[in-house]
Image (cartoon, grey):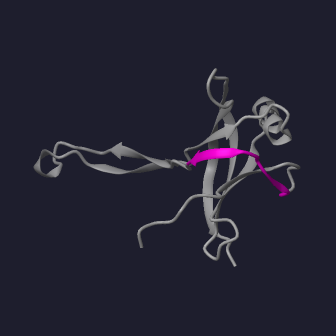
């Protein structure tokens, strides 16, 4: 298979803290989670052929980056400002291929580490948001 079209992917935020997810409007680009894992060096004087050796270390859930066609009057955009200001983590979802039989959902808890708006003279207003994942992001098949 050559691949799948990403069109329609959704960013959702838990608006109430009780699992009631609302789609963030006007999202144009999404990337992540960008998971990482530490490599712990365990090289010793008797390592074979003088090659460095490593064991697996801690994992990091990574980040999710989002570009939004920003609208200051849009409630879901204002909610992201509130998420940035709050001290607690919030639950989010990335829904891939929504409504399709092979729909999948990334569930993750995160804090917003970066939120920035751009107002170019010859283009649309944009908002860039970076979510730092806390804990393990979970990918689940959610299609029917």
Residue range of the region highlighted in magenta in the rendering? 19-31
Out of 49 and 82, give the one closest to the viewer.
82
> On the rendered image, what quadrant is the C terminus found in?
bottom right
Residue for point 85% across, 48% down: 15
Position of 86 relative to 92 (above/below): above
Residue for point 60% across, 74% down: 102
Q: Position of residue 51 (x, y in %)?
A: 17, 46
* 47 sits to left or right of 12: left
> On the rendered image, what quadrant is the N terminus found in?
bottom left
Residue for point 68% across, 65% down: 98
Q: Position of residue 67 (x, y in %)?
A: 63, 39
Q: Position of residue 31 (x, y in %)?
A: 55, 47
Out of 47 and 26, give the one closest to the viewer.
26
Q: Quadrant of residue 84?
A: top right
Out of 121 and 131, give the one closest to the viewer.
121
Residue for point 81% across, 31% down: 72
Q: Quadrant of residue 119?
A: top right
Question: Farthest residue toward the top?
Answer: 121
Out of 61 and 94, give the one closest to the viewer.
94
Q: Quadrant of residue 2?
A: bottom left
Position of 42 relative to 70 (above/below): below
* 87 sits to left or right of 42: right
Q: Position of residue 37 (x, y in %)?
A: 45, 48
């Amino acid at each position: 298979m050559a691949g799948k079209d990403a069109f329609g992917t959704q960013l959702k935020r838990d608006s109430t803290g009780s699992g009631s997810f609302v789609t963030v409007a006007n999202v144009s680009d999404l990337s992540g989670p960008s998971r990482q894992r530490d490599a712990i060096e365990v090289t010793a004087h008797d390592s074979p052929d003088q090659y460095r050796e490593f064991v697996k270390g801690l994992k990091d859930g990574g980040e999710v980056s989002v570009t939004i066609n920003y609208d200051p009057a849009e409630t879901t955009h204002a909610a992201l400002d509130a998420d940035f200001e709050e001290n607690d983590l919030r639950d989010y979802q990335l829904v891939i291929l929504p409504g399709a039989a092979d729909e999948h959902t990334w569930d993750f808890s995160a804090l917003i580490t970066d939120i920035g708006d751009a107002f170019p003279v010859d283009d649309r207003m944009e908002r860039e948001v970076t979510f730092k994942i806390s804990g393990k992001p979970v990918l689940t098949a959610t299609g029917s």
